[in-house]
Image (cartoon, rainbow, N blue to C red):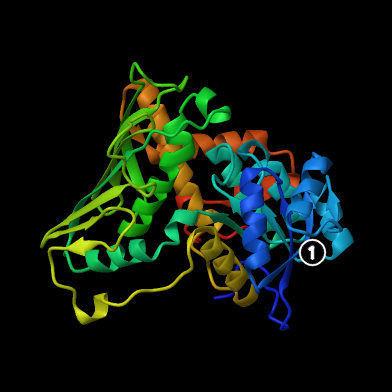
Amino acid sequence: MSTPFATIPDDGTPLRVVVVGAGGMGRAWLRTVEESPSVELVGIVDLDLTAAAEAAASLDRPDLPVGAGTAQLASDVGAQAVINVTVPAAHHPVTTEALAAGLPVLGEKPVASTVAQGLSLAAAAELHGQLFMVSQSRRYNRHLFSAKRMSSCLGSVGTVSAEFFKAPHFGGFRDAMDHPLLLDMAIHQFDMARFLLDADPVSVFCEEYNPSWSWYRGDAGSTAIFEMTGGERFVFTGSWCSPGQETSWNASWRISGEHGTVLWDGDNEPVSSVPATSDAVGSEDRGQEIAGSLRDFVSAVRTGSTPMGRVHRNIMSLAMVEAAILSASTGARVSVDSLLEDSYQQAILAERDPAVLEVLKSWTSVRSALAGESVAL
């Protein structure tokens, strides 16, 4: 089967990239890019040129080109790919601009502000024949892969649960968000559950709440029960204002199956009640966190391999977040297919690029398009 996106064969030189976004997360990406032998940083884009210049200086590269326009700077410096580390509201316009310029994109999570915008970006990636990969960095964890291998010895899995309890005082935008835990953090655990189960969401019932001592304006606590496509249940419960005995940032996990249980504290090697078989031992090194995302992206661009975070695969993680928020607001169980259909209609109504709109309208169903079963005309 042909590769669904263009590749840039390895010529022995690093992939030339520009990073868009010079904030805190942008600087983390800049350091990661600088440390990677597989990429070369050739420019920084930010609407605040002073911030971009300061970020370049922090790398001891004060002469690094900076600019306010993604496509323009990429063209000026001969970039081959874009790393989008902007705020979520800018994910759609920045990624759209880069894809239209013929550039593959590695973007920070979430894929976009809404599932509807994510569908637009998936269609744009198809239209332009470019890879758009979302960095779900917490998938790139050796212990998570070990937990997945161990769970293959459990027989049928009935329940996966994740408990997340932290008490960070961020300040800034998170303190003012409507759904700080679900929007900014839970997507990591939702995405990890999809990875562990090789399954997608069918429906969810969710409740949100805000403890009396919470320093967040929006609800900082939540419990969600997802039905998954294999019949399993994924249960997430957590709080972002729970001091003392805090869990890992990766959460604390239990995988309960027909023959036993796997436990993972999120930081150390998981343990299983079932002895591992020969085909379930070993450890796959996929790199760690954003460095792992970067390595996966470069490999995909070079070889045509499908990365874990390809936009079509990743949209379901954001769909879990939107469905959970909708359930909490209505007090009812939410069908993910219904949410996808509503988002699809929103995407069609909002799309301003006629060519992208044509791709969207060619999809026979959202799930089949995201699974790669529906090809644009």
Furthest toward the left, the residue is 259
Residue 48 x %, y %? 80, 39
Residue at 23% x, 64% y: name it.
151
Quarter of the figure that contains the N terminus:
bottom right
Q: Above or below — where is 270 with respect to 356?
A: below
In the shown orientation, is residue 204 left or right of residue 367?
left
Quarter of the figure that contains the C terminus:
bottom right
In the shown orientation, is residue 329 left or right of residue 100?
left
Residue 96 x %, y %? 71, 48
Of 326 and 24, nearer the camera is 24
Q: Give the residue number, with chain letter if any, for mark 1.
A: 79
Label 1 Cα neighbours within 10 Å, binned few <14 / some 14-19 / many ≥20: some
In the shown orientation, is residue 186 left or right of residue 245?
right
Residue 99 x %, y %? 72, 55
Element at badge 1? loop
- Residue type, numbered disc 1: Ala
Residue at 12% x, 63% y: name it.
273
Quadrant in the rendering for residue 244: top left
Residue at 77% x, 42% y: name it.
51
Q: Above or below — where is 291 with respect to 214?
A: below
Is residue 290 visible in this depiction of the protein? yes
